[in-house]
Image (cartoon, rainbow, N blue to C red):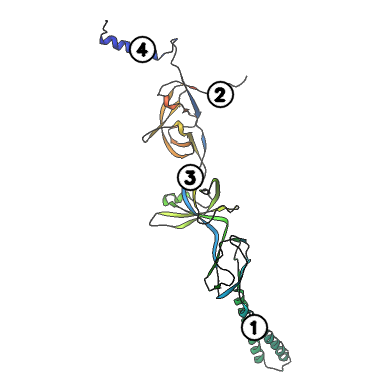
Amino acid sequence: MIRLRPPSVLLLVLLLTACGRETADGGPPTAVVVTTTVVQPQPWSDTIEALGTARANESVLITAKVTETVVRVNFEDGDEVEAGDVLVDLSGKAELAGLEEAAAAYREARQQYERQRELAERKLISAGQLDTQRAAMESARARLDATRARLADRVITAPFAGVLGFRQVSPGTLVTPGTTITSLDDISVIKLDFTIPETYLSAVAPGQTVRARSAAWPEREFEGRVATVESRVDPVTRAVTVRAELPNPDRLLRPGMLLTLRLFQPERQALVVPEIAVTQVARDAHVFRVREDGTVEQVPVTLGARRAGEVEVAAGLSAGDRIVVDGVVKLRPGMRVAEANPEPAAAG
């Protein structure tokens, strides 16, 4: 058996390493096939994510104003109504009789006034008598108007267009002031209230785009605009409430729903790279940049905001740099790379 001396073993290792760096025919090292891209500025919009509660554009509980018996209910659960539609008729027999009495008293007082006015023009009665009769006529007219107002309280109408909730009364029900008859919600537009930390207060303004999603409609995205920013910051949570308005023509969103939303800030230009091009080690991030000679160098980068599959590079790269996108796991600084799908040469 032949034993090699230690210097000979070291020499053998060096020779094997040198052979591994060359191809079989003694040429340069084989290039690693990768996919690259050129970094260029792109439109970028920062987003703020939050949770919001849906509210109706207008919402009210329809209640009775007087103590009376329900005569007729003119709606069903969930009906859509217009402003002024009659919802419930209450019994008003006594008020109808009072209306006729007040109307008769007013007609009599007006006739007396017309007669005395003619006599006053011919100087047959004094002006004081005419003034007394005028006051009596106006008093009768006021009583007539008051009776009409009380009678109007027996007819309950919709104050605005919207969707009714469940009805809480039936014909024959005795209602009192404050008794709930039903609810009415205008959901053609949904008000979405959400809170954001006060640190984002300078980044929010009316008119910004909001996109929201609901668990009930996962395939739909609802777009709206910021309408108002609360004038006060909560001293306990250090958060401010923002209200957005979302058009709801299909009536899919309902008051009380929980929605996830993204608030988009005005667009700006940023250097954006695919996330798979970035290698993250603890807090350090770097990419492989391709030099002019076809070799790569490892470049540390500072990352910014992220979105689906992409990340903003705040520092470390410049527009026009070519970086490796696919194949970074098999690269080391100084390696030579080749494009997997090179661009075809221009004809002629």
Q: Quadrant of residue 283?
A: top left
Q: In the drawing, what numbered circle is on residue 47?
A: 3
Determine the secondary structure under disc 1. Answer: helix
Q: Which residue is mark 2?
A: 343
Q: x, y (%) of residue 327?
A: 45, 26
Near-viewer residue (148 or 271): 148
The reply to whether the C-beta atoms of the residues labelled 1 and 4 are less than 8 Å apart is no
Q: Residues within 10 Å of mark 2 (few under 14, many from 20)?
A: few
At label 1, which amino acid type do we have?
Ala
Taking 199 as reference, is 282 above or below it?
above
Is 322 left, or right, of 109 in this rendering? left
Q: Quadrant of residue 124?
A: bottom right
The alpha-carbon separation of the residues under discs 2 and 3 comes to: 35 Å
At label 3, which amino acid type do we have?
Thr
The alpha-carbon separation of the residues under discs 2 and 1 comes to: 95 Å
Q: Residue at x 54, y 58 (%)?
A: 56
Q: x, y (%) of residue 120?
A: 71, 91
Determine the secondary structure under disc 2. Answer: loop
At label 4, which amino acid type do we have?
Leu
Q: Which residue is mark 4?
A: 16
Taking 76 as reference, is 303 above or below it?
above
